[in-house]
Image (cartoon, coloured by chain):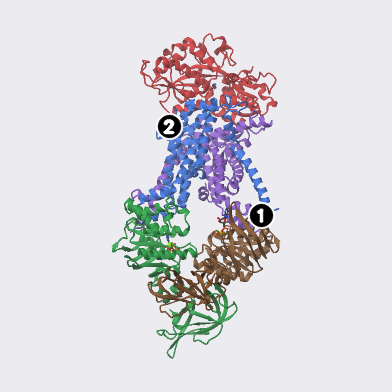
Chain colours: A purple, B brown, C green, D red, E blue
Amino acid sequence: MSTRQSRLRTVTRTVGEQLGGRVGNRHLAALGLGFVGVFFVLPILLLVPESLALGTSAPFQAYSRAMQGIYVNAFVRSFLYGIMTTVATLSLAYLIAYYLAFAARRIRMAMTLVIVPLWIAYIVRYFGILLFFSPAGPLADATGYEPSILFTTPAVVIGLANVYLPFAVLPIYNSLNAIDRELVSASRVLGATNWRTIISVIFPLSLPGLVAAGLIVFILAAGSFLGPAVLGGPKQTMIANVIAQAFLDNFNIQFASALAIIYTVLLVGLLLVFNTAFDLREVLGNI
Amino acid sequence: MLEVKNFTKYYDDLCAVKDLSFRIEEGEFVTLLGPSGCGKSTTLHSIAGLVEPTDGSIHLRGTDVTDLPPEKRNIGMAFQSTALFPHMTVRENIAYGLKMHGYEKADVQERVEESLELVDMPDHGDHVPGELSGGQQQRVSLARALAYEPDILLLDEPLTGLDRVLREEMRGWLNRIQREVGVTTLYVTHDQEDALSMSDTVIVLDDGRDQQIDSPERIYESPANEFVAEFVGKSTQFTGTVTQENGHTIVQNGTKSIELTESDLTDGETVSVFIRPEDIEVGLEQIGADNEFSGTLTDIANLGNRAEVTVTLDDGTTALAHTSRFPEMTVGDTVYLRFDTGRVIVL
Amino acid sequence: MLEVKNFTKYYDDLCAVKDLSFRIEEGEFVTLLGPSGCGKSTTLHSIAGLVEPTDGSIHLRGTDVTDLPPEKRNIGMAFQSTALFPHMTVRENIAYGLKMHGYEKADVQERVEESLELVDMPDHGDHVPGELSGGQQQRVSLARALAYEPDILLLDEPLTGLDRVLREEMRGWLNRIQREVGVTTLYVTHDQEDALSMSDTVIVLDDGRDQQIDSPERIYESPANEFVAEFVGKSTQFTGTVTQENGHTIVQNGTKSIELTESDLTDGETVSVFIRPEDIEVGLEQIGADNEFSGTLTDIANLGNRAEVTVTLDDGTTALAHTSRFPEMTVGDTVYLRFDTGRVIVL
Amino acid sequence: TGGGGSNSGGSENGSSSGSGGSGGSGPLRFLGFGGNTQKAQMSVFESWSENSGTAVKGTSASGTTEMISLIKQNPGSFDVVALNDTGMARAKQEDVIEPIDLSKIPNYEKNIKESARTLSFNVDGDKTMGLIRENGATGYAYNSEKINKELTSWEAVKNPEYEGKVSLIDRTMDRLANCAAAAGVNINEVPGSESKKEKMFTEAEEQNKNVFAYWSDGATSIRYLRQENAWICEAWGGRVLALHGEGGYDHIKYVVPNEGAMGWSDNLAIVKGSKNTATAHELLNHTYQREQLLTLSDKMNYTVQVKNPPKKMKQLPDYAPAEDLAFRDWGALLEKQDAWTQRLDKIKQN
Amino acid sequence: MSVQSSSRIRRAGLVGTVGLVFAFLLLPVLIVVLTSFTTQNFPAIPQEGISLKWYGELLNDQKLIDALTVSLIVATFSSILSSIVGTIAAFGFVRSEFPYKEHISTVMLLPMIISPVITGIALVRYFGTISLPSGYPALILGHTVLSLPYVFLLVRSELVTFDQDLERASRVLGADPITTFRQVTGPIISPAILAGGFIAFVVSFGEFTATQFLISPETSTVPVVIYTMLRTGLTPTINALSVVLILIMVVAALGSRRFSTS
Ligand SMILES: Nc1ncnc2c1ncn2[C@@H]1O[C@H](COP(=O)(O)OP(=O)(O)OP(=O)(O)O)[C@@H](O)[C@H]1O
Ligand SMILES: Nc1ncnc2c1ncn2[C@@H]1O[C@H](COP(=O)(O)OP(=O)(O)OP(=O)(O)O)[C@@H](O)[C@H]1O
Ligand SMILES: NCCCCNCCCN
Ligand SMILES: [Mg+2]
Ligand SMILES: [Mg+2]
């Protein structure tokens, strides 16, 4: 009896068997990969030929254009805003998650409140924020104070942090919740104050969730389009806006593709660097 | 050393512990023994400052610590789950309590190494807990709790969940270390073998109330009530009526009558009588002893070094007795049970 | 009933079980005993059809079932983890196997109730497993495995993880039920007490190879090799050299010499000698017996019905002995160990 | 401005077909901007549907580029499209519209001024590609409660007092056309002159200084004014007039600055690949009846270049007869779009 | 200071701070809810009196109702599809071994990682190339790809902790592999699949950035219609719609344990 057969017959591989015995679980993995391959990876790869002016004297013309100041700025801004949003979101999310895991009396209610905003289209929420801070908005109405925050970087970061907050709360909450309460007791009995316990025990143990949350917020924020479009001014243009503008307003598919390719390569590169510090597989498993 | 006075704890309406008082002297090993949910952990956690008493007070070295947060009590504690910090190495785990207690860096290092020696794990300092076996984790947990020389060591069922072999081994460890270090210890368990084998004093707890506070021997030989008698060690129980017959005290139960040496019982009184299985002799022949009953062997459990046999007496009641290993008996045999009246426990 | 012939299992390069053969007769209770990782589960799973043998064959009621999928083998199995379906009630769990075995609806219902009776849980039918205690879950798991009258019952460490009290209780259960139902059973454990107390035959397994297949008594009294002697039951071990002196066989070890009744040993041979703790008598006075050694008491563990004492002999070796409960001895006492030469196990 | 859905405008009542004598192949599909121009247009189409029995189904997109994308991605899905002047130029370039047979639309010549019928973006050689519908200017509006003096010039945009209180249009050629006007240059001459180009961009740079955001759709400009994000906001007169109509916003004043402002027009065209070109021509002919054109002007608040415009139209804030207007020459400008956008983007982000 | 009073102060401090964070999080929601009751014709906080007229308008707004229908159809089909594909893939990855398995599995997560603008552009070009009609086919496929990683992650982590002894028990009890999946594996992991499907639904329902490239004239989704309305004039009907959706969600979440925990 060959090993191959033995793999098929072992009970742990049930699903493969039910599809007629000839399909192994590896085929199921292949099916998933195939789906993503055909409807995602291939389309993205096809942007590469689109981005090149093949057969012309300057096949990389779109790429050299992308090296110019304003586009480089847009890339830098995307990553910078991504980081700023991540820092802001994680701090706020940690507070909420900590509360949910250790102090909340009505967790279901609180959890529902965290999720409620997801049901309102991003754009409507951004408009809520815009209206709130506007000179004729409720804040100025109630306090007489007109913050000059709109159409600035803080406005965009506040907006992004606001809409991505729920995405960060859940993984952090999950990892906080998984912490054995006896570890907290142990730390206290060993002589650590509540605060020291948070720093030395709770925080390090929640890192997987925190890193997962950070990763997802960074990815979402860096690639966002509506936030800067609604709450930012010209100096807050991010790469998604440039790509959309190139494609929609200027019909420059070649340039849009080039920007998309550059962004994808940069992001994947960044994730690989990230992967050397944190195990990406584990981190994504926490999302 | 430690004094618990009238400790009472309610969780909302549920009374977990009611009016419990006891004291532990310097260097003593005391065990809180009781079934699941009887309030053992609640008591231990209150002593550690992790649970706030509803009523009563906790005194350590003569000071009322009832309102002190856990980190100010200088207590060592080992948990059932070990509660080792998974993100720290064994060394870091042990160093944690030392640092929190303000030890100098050099001292910390030295004491960590000493503690590793103590639990016989000098080579495992750089492992993380996940890489250790269950028994090793328990040892590290103990080392961590002892490293900073706490006034008292609290152990919350540290052996539960270990299998029998490991459990016995760890029991030996605990005993040895407690002897070497001489630290005052309060041990929580629901396993009577743990309690009897290690303690100076056993506090038997049931349903939040203490049932008996005594030496292991007294707990086993002179249980204060039926609960203690049944919870600590196996036994065969008869309930009967007392008759005094020319200077002899006899307990009458159906067709059985048991003659006792005890004499302060009054005629007509109903008593419960317990006999430990190891006090019952089982024979295939009748020898005409004073307390001898015949019955049918209904079960034999060979436990290696001994066998535990179940006998259904002629009046239908069941008795449990120990024999030497692999006895020459088979289920269905008619057997004779005998015991020394001095060994009978009367309640 | 069941015959395993030359069963061998490799996981890639790792040899989990090597050339194992044994048979179980109708109604027998056989235990596979061995340390963790020795291949017990692998063997059991092969019999159930859950793991495919690399070599060898499995025969049930005379038919080669090696190539049959698990659902065609009519086997009952209880897992250590109980493997109760968490989304079904106790009743549904028990009914599952009945339905899969083609029982009529009315029959299913009837047998479910019978099975609940059998394991003494008639009132828990509508609970989901999560609401039951560990012991109750084990009982349901057993009921589920027995309900459809399987040809053979396979039990994969069903008692591991239960605490001592529950474990003893469950052992009684298993024994009773096996007796009532009379089903052929193959039981897997690493706990010698389980093995000795329940089995007709014990198969001791180490590192994928069988070490001894024998009755509990023979396993305990006449271990086939050192592994079996050490794994099954505690003992004190001496290694020594044989000298024949005027008809007597003497094993010489340092300053100790032990006289044996056994005589087929040759002069100069090196042998290992084992003595069980319950075979050693401990006294505070020397009585001048044949095999008597003096030493110092270094530990006493009161186990309730007996005590286990550790003695360091004068030549520095350590011996383990049982005494009656709460002995009148203290650590540090000089004691004398004696044993009957007939009780010495020689390998 | 109710929520009455612009793409459903004329579709419900046109279930019968075949009675218009035009081959009767289902409803006509119209693609427009949405908003009140779309609503006005649909009401005119509806009156045609009632007579012809052919329904007109309206769809709206949020901008010309989206409209052209939509047409390209859904070939055969549209018959008639409304495009602005830029859109016409683009649509010609992208080859998504068909020549129009003017002989089948006699009302166009009859009712529209000749000077408005030959605008460069609506023709391709001797072929007519688009029919002008309404036109207007892109001036600016200001909040007279915040700024209590009368503004008349582009200079106001540069006044340092209004720092962070100005919003301008985000469309490159619209923006630059106004900068050119402010700098006294005709944008159509900029491609041929380096110095005029520098003047235009210098003006763009100066006007940028007070800007907090550029808007890319008319609704946003009005929102900025309403929420007081902007004190001065480049805007379309019709939109401002509609705002006045809401009540309470009379302090928002609209001006066409005295240096001049860019002119724009919306136009109707027939989509390439339409299977209903004959019916489409009928529909267009209906639309260009004088009576319908006046309805359009009335509802949109913009100029429609009818012969003998009525007094009411002449009072519109944006009113500009074709003979006074210089429209952009997209033939020269379109190829500059990408480069100028890039340069303007640089200015915006300094 | 006693344990209890210091911990009470700490708790009060935490609750206060967390209250502020919640206020920040829910600020847009609050504004959306308030403005849905405005008497004015554009989104504004009600000043004098409130009205339900925008809820009435919502019922009459055919365009929004059409878009809502499209959104629901697309979200339903894409969440079903991604639940199926995601579950199959998760099974495949958890229950098989092959070289670089873990690295390869990150490919399944790419749609979550790459900006939806890029996804949208890539898909619209690709669908054009393979002549896949825009509208439902493009939208459903696109949203399936975009939500697939969420289902995959959820089901995978459920399967990793799934006790395979349950499947073994089922087999020994006489059930064949298909029955085992139907009766045991399926029901037990179904909460994870449902949670994944629920998240996929939410993702699809709210997606705008990639969706704007994939719609056809007849199949605008709610976010796209809102975006279009923004440019032509946003009315508080949108807010009314949002409030209705929130209500549905809150009722569903409070009513079913399953969804709120995932
Ligand atoms: N935080 C709590 N909230 C409410 N009730 C509790 C809490 N902790 C314990 N209890 C209840 O108090 C009683 C005593 O619990 P405790 O944990 O002290 O028992 P225990 O003796 O340690 O049991 P075990 O041996 O199972 O650990 C039990 O009925 C338990 O259910
Ligand atoms: N699926 C598998 N793949 C590879 N190796 C395996 C597999 N299952 C078991 N093994 C290995 O085979 C050997 C025997 O394993 P098995 O599970 O049969 O031991 P066991 O006696 O049941 O141990 P335990 O008492 O710990 O359950 C072990 O070394 C184990 O690591
Ligand atoms: N209210 C509708 C306004 C339409 C304006 N179209 C402007 C086109 C500018 N190029
Ligand atoms: Mg406890
Ligand atoms: Mg095993």
Task: Work out whether residue B44 or residue A32 is closer to the camera in this orientation and state it.
Answer: B44
Q: Is E115 above or below relative to B279?
A: above
Query: In the picture, residue D183 is in which quadrant?
Result: top right
Query: In the picture, residue C343 is in which quadrant?
Result: bottom left
Q: Amino acid under label 2?
A: Ser
Task: Work out whether residue C286 or residue E184 is closer to the camera in this orientation and state it.
Answer: C286
Q: What label does residue E134 carry, if any?
A: 2
| Mark 2 chain | E
**x then y, percent, for residue C237:** 49, 78
CB atoms at circles 1 and 2 under 8 Å apart? no
Identity of the residue furthest to the bottom in this view: C246
Label 2 element class? loop
Marks 1 and 2, Cα distance to the nearest angstrom?
61 Å
Q: Amino acid under label 1?
A: Thr
Q: Is B149 above or below relative to B68?
A: below
Residue bearing mark 1: A193
Q: Residue at x 59, y 32 (%)?
A: E31
**x then y, percent, for residue D291:** 49, 11
